[in-house]
Image (cartoon, grey):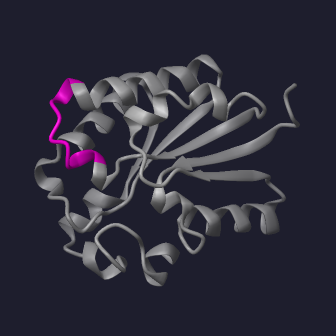
Amino acid sequence: MMEKNKSILFLGFSVTADKSGYANILSRIFHEKYTIESDVIGLGAFTPEDLMYLMDYIFLKQNYAHVILEINTSAWRYKKLSYSEYYLPIRYISEYLIRKNINIMFVNLPRGDVDYSDDIATKVIEDIASELKINHFDLASQLYVENKVKNYLRDQVHTNNEGAQY
C-alpha cells in the first residue's frame, strides 16, 4: 500500500546521507520554511549500478513529485568504465523515474579527486540531462573552473560546514 505523498526525495550515496550535508540541510529548510515534506536516502558505498536494482524497493511505498539525484560518486569513477558503462545505469534510473511521472534534478557536487575538465561520468550526466530534458545543477564543474573545490570539502568527497551551506 502506498503511503501519503511526499514532495521531494533526495537520493544519493554517502554525501547525501551526511547528516550535516546539503540534503539534510535543505530538507529541514523545506519543512520549516515552506512545510514541504521530503525524505533523504543516502546509500553509502553504493554506485548507480547498484541503485538500478534498488529502485523498485525505494519507490514501493512512497510516491514523490520530485527526486534530486546526487549520484556522480568518486567510487564509481575509480572503476574507469567506458562511456556506455557509465551511461546505461544513469539512463535506466532516469527513465524509471520518468515512467513514474517524477520530476528529476541531477545535482553534481564537487569531489577533490576529480578532474572536471575531462570527466566522462559528468559528461554522461550532462548528455542524459540534455537528451531527456532533465534539470542539471553542476556545481562541481563551476567550482572546478573557479579553483574552489578544495575550499568546500573536509575530505576528497564530503563537504565541510562551509561547503554544505554553499
Decide if residue 4 is on the left or right side of residue 29: right
Q: Which residues are magenta?
A: 76-84
56 left or right, relative to 29: left
Queried whether the magenta region covers residue 27, the answer comes back as no
Q: How many marks?
A: 0
**Quadrant of the rendered structure where residue 142 is?**
bottom left
Indicate the quadrant where residue 122 lies.
top left
- Quadrant where the N terminus is found in the figure: top right
> Would you place residue 118 above or below residue 111 in this image?
above
Left or right: residue 77 versus residue 71 is left
Percent x, y for residue 43? 52, 50
Q: Who's the residue at 18% across and 40% down the image?
A: 120
Residue 157 image position (x, y, % from top left):
34, 66
Magenta residue check for 79: yes
Residue 102 coordinates in the image, percent (x, y): 63, 29
Picture residue at 19% right of the left edge, 74% below the top? 147
